[in-house]
Image (cartoon, rainbow, N blue to C red):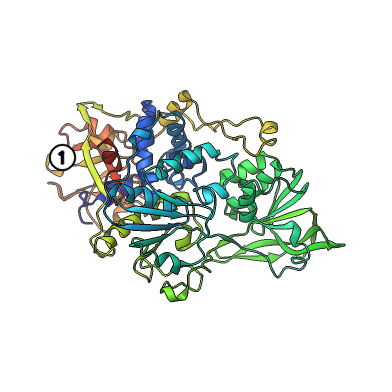
Amino acid sequence: MKPTNTADPEYFHKVVDCQFACPAHTPVPEYIRLIAQERYTDAYMINWESNVFPGVLGRTCDRPCEPACRRGRVEEEPVAICRLKRVAADFKDDVKHLIPQAGPKNGKRIALIGGGPASLTVARDLAPLGYELHLYDEHAKAGGFMRSQIPAFRLPDEVLDEEVDYVLNMGIHTTFNTYVDSLQSILDKNYDAVFVGCGAPRGRDLPSLPGRKEADANIHLGIDWLSSVAFEHTKKIGKRVIVLGGGNTAMDCCRTSRRLGGEDVKVIVRSPFEDMKASPWEKEDTIHEGIPILDNHVPKEFVVKKGKLVGMTFEKVKAVYDEEGKRRLVPTGEDLVHVDCDDVLIAIGQENAFPWIEKSTGVRFTSWGTPIINDDETFQSTRKEVFFGGDSAFGPANIITAVAHGHKAAVSIDMYCNGKNPEVDRPAPHHTLVSQKMGIHEWSYDSIPVTDKREAVPLVDLKEALKSKTLEVELGFDADTAFVQAERCLNCDAQTVFTESTCIECDACTDICPTSCISFIENGDEDDLRARLLVPAENPEQDLYVSDTLPTGKVMVKDEDVCLHCGLCAERCPTAAWDMQKFFYTMAKATPDLLVEAAE
């Protein structure tokens, strides 16, 4: 293998598994260390620069960072990254003076369609550059699906309002209670660019299922129903409720139903429990609240008697997987199952819907109803001044993905408005690599891995929780628990950096490494090297760190997958061939450093 190019920022970025997995590339170890130091405001602002909504995401994020967490490879549970984000939000001081304001006007006007996380991120990134930003939303408040689809018992209004207002108070012009029914009408206002961040607003239905039309009054599309509850249009539901679907929206529907009068609420899903799209913790919360999940049940009919919905029938199936893992649902041959109900909530997925975008605008769509976009970096449509992001770009995803889209789209809009091609010459990510040495055996971070276990976030009393649709269920960590949980982080951004010219091949690092991830061996191709290490490197998704040829003709090879970043190799090395260097990485933004903007 060739020597590893550690000058490439993407190499060490990939080693910081949690940050690499985050769509917005939030510097996770950096803010967790700040929490351990009780520097909550600093931790919050590090988050805010990357993900814009730390208080929201600390409660609702889909947590792609946690399955990637290195702690999960050495013990059962990863670091509680998401809930530590909430700690930063809960314990921060007033940060209004740290939020950048609108810059001097640059003469450019941008329209933002939809007030969700993608549009708000674009506004946050472009406002300091002097753009005049006009946001249009059909509801009375911004927030998009963060407000309309996430129940208040998971995300209190005051938390969402606070973080949305940080953006709107940067001088954003807002037009609420206005449904944009024509893209051409927006283009006619001569905006320099238009960003479409209206989400995927149409819920999938079961229009051909027998009884659907007859029972229409008691059958509701999940996302529309949640929105109606959020905006106080719906305040009750029947005592017997069936929720169809296995995603997070279905979990929110059933839990909300329990709070609006549903006494017998069931989730019924066609897939096996293990294949449900809902996050594991969402399923756990649902079961904790006494809501059964019936899997492997395919809906066959809405049962209507005397013009009223009385139940549904289902066919029982089992999952059969082929050699490639593709699933088929095969009927078991058992009798149909009847389940009584007064109301049904359909939460089986969402679709893009752009009836308001005229063909004459030149914006083209795929056969799936998603816009044709240059790539997932530019987010530029077939009409050059129109950009998409969030769920409206590629279909339903999550908040943190929408934020990442917003950052990238803001870069593209800024380039386009300045006469540059968004596909070329995009700014590189910002990164630094700095030694953490304070003494021969001392680092500027806690390098020794602790053995504390992950703790669950405490909850309010279940009886009290089910009485209110606004009482927040999770209490969050207190400061002491937050410290213990933060100390579980392995500081994966403190990189082990090797210098061949000072290595004497004494094997001291190999002897002391607790995971035996360092080997001095003859070079070879990657598969060969992986097999010949002291401990074979079995995860090809993570790279091998390979040195240049050493005096003996061997190379140093380190398996980045199992390194604990404990620093013992650097402490033990008699020639300082190893050093612990903190790697800091942030994705490119239209405004390169918002925290600097705020300070100025």
Q: Residue reaching furthest bottom?
A: 360
Q: Residues within 10 Å of mark 1 (few under 14, many from 20)?
A: some
312 up-or-down from 120: above or below: below
**Can you see residue 335?**
no
Q: Residue at x 40, y 54 (%)?
A: 134
- The location of residue 360, given as percent across then percent down, is 44, 76
Name the residue: 30% across, 43% down: 594
Q: Is residue 163 left or right of residue 496?
A: right
x then y, percent, for residue 482 = 45, 28
From the top left corner, tell me how far across and down residue 191 is, in percent.
Answer: 36, 62
Quadrant of the rendered image containing residue 574: top left
Taking the image as shown, residue 114 lies to the left or right of residue 17, namely right
* Residue in the picture at 66% in, 49% down: 233
Q: Outermost residue, right direction?
A: 306
- On the question of residue 257 being in view, the answer is yes
Q: Quadrant of the C terminus?
A: top left
Towards the viewer: 502 or 231? 231
Q: Quadrant of the N terminus?
A: bottom left
Q: Amino acid at mark 1?
A: Cys
According to the image, label 1 marks what residue? 503
Provide the secondary structure element on which disc 1 rests: loop
Is 91 on the left-hand or right-hand side of 417? Answer: right
Q: Position of residue 289 (x, y in %)?
A: 68, 39
Which residue is outermost to the top? Answer: 480
Q: Quadrant of residue 268?
A: bottom right
